Amino acid sequence: MEALLKISDGIDNVVTRVGKMASLLAIPLMFVIIYDVIQRKFGGQGSIKLQELEWHLHTGLFMLCFGYAYVRDSHVRIELIRDQLRPRTRAIIEMIGGLLCVLPFCALVIYFGFDFVIRSYDNHEVSAATTGLTHRWIIKSTIPIGFGLLAMAGLSIFLKCYVFVFGPANLHKRAGYYVGTHHADLGDVAKLED
């Protein structure tokens, strides 16, 4: 069981590093938006390239940070219901959800997304606008990469929940942070071992 947690921690490290690096895309995105807004307000018409760069940066930011949000338990949940459940029940639901929803969905998106990127690359796909950005395959590649990171995060969470449910009591604290009341309010160890 200790080995499963080490694997999970390794996966978390990769997903976290990519997510933190990708979050830096917010900085150029902010400057591009500000520049585009000022240019439209005072310069007349905006730039097609800038508008496309905005959604390219926005897409990269979100696609590459989904997995990071999942391992940090920062994604959308129905906490009103989840917080009323025992930690063991939360872990079981998380495991089932990962096996039946997260991992199969990610596998489908990666499979079809990879083909989507290859076709875009082979066709030298560019923007439909004559003054738009080229190399459309680059932004499309964030789809399979992002869902690959999300699948890795799903596997990591599955392993932690598995250890929490089936592992020895001495690993509950280390494996069970994810099934705490809330990522910002984890409670004490006794609550995790209910």
Image (spheres, rainbow, N blue to C red):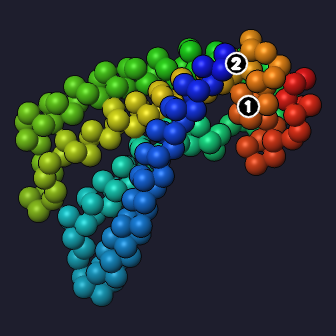
Q: Quadrant of residue 92?
A: top right
| Location of residue 30 with respect to 98 vertically, above or below | below
Marks 1 and 2, how far apart at CA: 9 Å
Residue at 76% in and 48% down = 184
Residue at 43% in and 45% down = 18
* Quarter of the image with the N terminus in it: top right
Q: Nearer the viewer, residue 42 or 26?
A: 26
Q: Which label sits on residue 137?
A: none
Instruction: Give the residue pinned by disc 1.
Output: 174
Residue at 34% in and 82% down = 38
Image coordinates for residue 39, horizontal then vertical, percent: 29, 81
Secondary structure type for disc 1? helix
Instruction: Give the residue pinned by disc 2.
Output: 163
Residue at 33% in and 70% down = 32
Does residue 63 appear in the picture of this structure? yes
Secondary structure type for disc 2? helix
Please state if 146 lies on the left or on the right of 89 as rendered.
left
Q: Report the amino acid beneath label 1.
A: Arg
Q: Report the amino acid beneath label 2.
A: Val
Image coordinates for residue 116, horizontal then vertical, percent: 23, 30
| Location of residue 117 with respect to 46 vertically, above or below | above
Please state if 160 lies on the left or on the right of 108 as rendered.
right
Please state if 135 lies on the left or on the right of 98 as rendered.
left
| Location of residue 103 with respect to 18 vertically, above or below | above
Along the polypeptide, which appears first: circle 1 or circle 2? 2
